[in-house]
Amino acid sequence: MSPGRVIKVECRCGYLLFKYYKGGRGRLIKCFLDHLTEDNVGIETLSLGTRPTCPACDKVIGEIRIVRGRPALKLNQGAIKPTRT
Ligand SMILES: [Zn+2]
């Protein structure tokens, strides 16, 4: 078990979409909604199947899905800045 940390997830346009508590290492593929520490998009209030967009440039940043039994945002890799831990 490696401790996680809070990372910033930004749109390609530079807008800070949200902050996320990420456990472990590796590329960010999905974000469990209950791990968001700051939400500038309003993702936490969206329902399944919704495709949230960046408030600044309107690009689709992903889709709300159930991942391992929990609501998560499956990221659109082309729309966010690459994030590695
Ligand atoms: Zn944007």
Image (tube, rainbow, N blue to C red):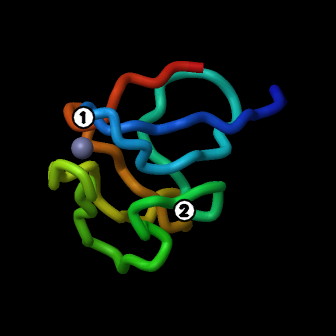
Q: Where is the N terminus found, in terms of image quarters?
A: top right
Q: In the structure shown, which secondary structural element does the residue marked by tag 2 occupy?
A: helix
Q: Residue at x 65, y 39 (%)?
A: 22
CB atoms of marks 2 and 1 within 8 Å: no
- Image point (59%, 46%), residue name: 20
**Which residue is painted at 39% across and 62% down in the image?**
41
Type of residue at label 1?
Cys
The residue drawn where x is 54% and y is 36% is 8
In-image side of 69 versus 60 (left or right): right
From the top left corner, tell me how far across and down residue 59 is, in percent: 16, 49
Q: Nearer the viewer, residue 29 or 69?
A: 29
Tell me where residue 24 sits by quadrant: top right
Residue 81 in the image, given as x and y percentages of width and height: 34, 27
Taking the image as shown, residue 11 lies to the left or right of residue 51, namely right
**In the picture shown, does residue 78 fall above or below 69?**
above
> Residue 85: x, y in percent?
60, 20
Q: CA distance from mark 2 to mark 1?
A: 22 Å
Q: Which class describes the residues within 10 Å of circle 1: few (<14), some (14-19), or many (20+)? A: some
Q: Earlier in the sequence, mark 2 or mark 1?
A: 1
From the image, state whether disc 2 or disc 1 is nearer to you. Answer: 1
Give the image location of residue 17, x and y in percent: 41, 49
Q: Secondary structure at mark 1?
A: loop
Give the number of marks: 2
Give the left or right position of residue 11, taking residue 28 as reference: left
Which residue lies under the disc numbered 2? 33
Query: Taking 44 as reference, is 53 above or below it?
Result: above
Above or below, 6 against 50 in this view is above
Label 1 lies in ligand 1 vicinity (Cβ under 8 Å): yes
Tag 2: amino acid: Leu
User: Splitting the image into 4 quarters, where does residue 64 fall?
Assistant: bottom left
Q: What residue is disc 1 on?
A: 13
